[in-house]
Amino acid sequence: MTSDVVSAEDTELLRSSVRDAFSELSRPGDVRRLMATATGWDHDVWSRLAGELGLPGLMLSAAHGGAGFSRAELAVVMEEAGATLLCAPLFATAALAVPLLLTCADEDALARYGPDISAGRLTATVALAEDDGRWSVDELRTTARRSGGGWVLDGVKNYVVDGATAGLVLVVAASDAGPAVFAVDAAAPGSRREQLVTLDQTRKQARLTFERTPAVAVGPAAAAGAIDRASNVSRALLAAEQTGGASRCLDLTVEYAKTRIQFARPIGSFQAVKQRLAEMLIQVESARSAAYAAAADDDLARIARIAAITCTDAYNWVSAQTIQLHGGIGFTWEHDAHLYFKRARASGQLLGTPGDHIVALAKQLDAETAP
């Protein structure tokens, strides 16, 4: 089924299916168990998400083992994943690697990797940021050069989501023609992977080092445009995930306000608390509107960055209010509020900070209004 025939009813059926699956497979206890492991995710769970729901290849075509859906349907999945803090390589594989493979439009690469990604046999990620943490192709220090009949990579990539466990890493490196994309196998010689200690323990990140590491070119020799388009798709999907997290924070806080008794009344009956909850709702709904606009709009260069700013700010603020309105219990390790708070802060740095997005939008506006 392709995205142009997906009805609202089908979309809600998809939402219901993934919500039920995540509610079963990503309960708070599961999240805490998996975030304490070295890999950060469960292979059996990933196999079920791939085999029963087809989530890794949702945007890949049927010819490549996928479902042929658009980012609008994957945004629904990502929102539900964000609500449960899903510990799985879904974001790295489906929201980072697959969009880059698609925008590179390399049929050989899609035929080589697509079926295994769709079946859950291969996880993938994108390595773009370097030690400065910027999600940008400007001033790349990782280089690619020809060696014999192929390519070799030299350099360091940092903050790579699921970088220590991904079977396929799509590395953005500087070549003679400009920024380009290269596929590196997990077992490639000359590559080293170091798991990072990060604020958000529910999403593993790694530092990757390449020393004359064999690689396969993916897509055009000069791929800056494809990388930029894929990054904007990933930002739209991340915005949907952030919306799901913010929405769950609101639900947790509303439920607590109904049951926490103070002065013989539920705290939700006090006007100050009602006002704060109303403000949280406004933030969540504003984020949802921005995220789904980005998921459906063709003007991704603009709307994806607007969604990134809106959803990052909303998730940061709502998760902070969740902790505050829970009072003392909200600051404890045993409560889940801090997990959402940390995910919110970390997500806001993944694909560019709000400041980066504002600068990019200002440059777009200058270019459009220049005489």
Image (cartoon, helix red, strand yellow):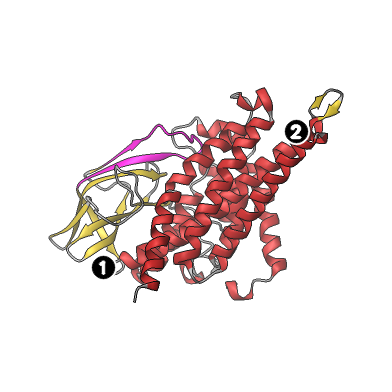
Q: Quadrant of the N terminus?
A: bottom right
Q: Which residue is drawn at 36% across and 70% down?
A: 367
Residue tagged by mark 2? 256
Rendered position, 181 above or below 220:
above
Rendered position, 369 above or below 41:
below
Q: Give the range drawn in magenta.
A: 192-211
Query: Where is residue 25 drawn, in percent x and y?
Result: 63, 42
Work out whether residue 121 or residue 180 is closer to the camera in this orientation and state it.
Answer: 180
Q: What element carries label 1?
A: loop
Q: Residue 231 vs residue 19: left or right?
A: left
Q: Is mark 2 on a helix, strand or loop?
A: helix
Mark linked to residue 222: 1
Q: Is residue 209 magenta?
A: yes
The answer to whether residue 255 is visible is: no
Q: What residue type is labelled 2?
A: Tyr
The answer to whether residue 95 is visible is: yes
Q: Residues within 10 Å of mark 2 (few under 14, many from 20)?
A: some
Question: Quarter of the image holding residue 23?
Answer: top right
Q: Which residue is drawn at 52% across and 45% down?
A: 88
Work out whether residue 350 or residue 328 is closer to the camera in this orientation and state it.
Answer: 328
Q: Quadrant of the C terminus?
A: bottom left
Query: Where is residue 52 drawn, in percent x and y?
Result: 61, 55
Rendered position, 105 above or below 93:
below
Q: What residue type is labelled 1?
A: Ala
Mark linked to residue 284: none
Whole-angstrom CA distance, mark 2 to mark 1, is 53 Å
Work out whether residue 358 or residue 339 is closer to the camera in this orientation and state it.
Answer: 358
Query: Where is residue 253 drawn, in percent x and y?
Result: 71, 37
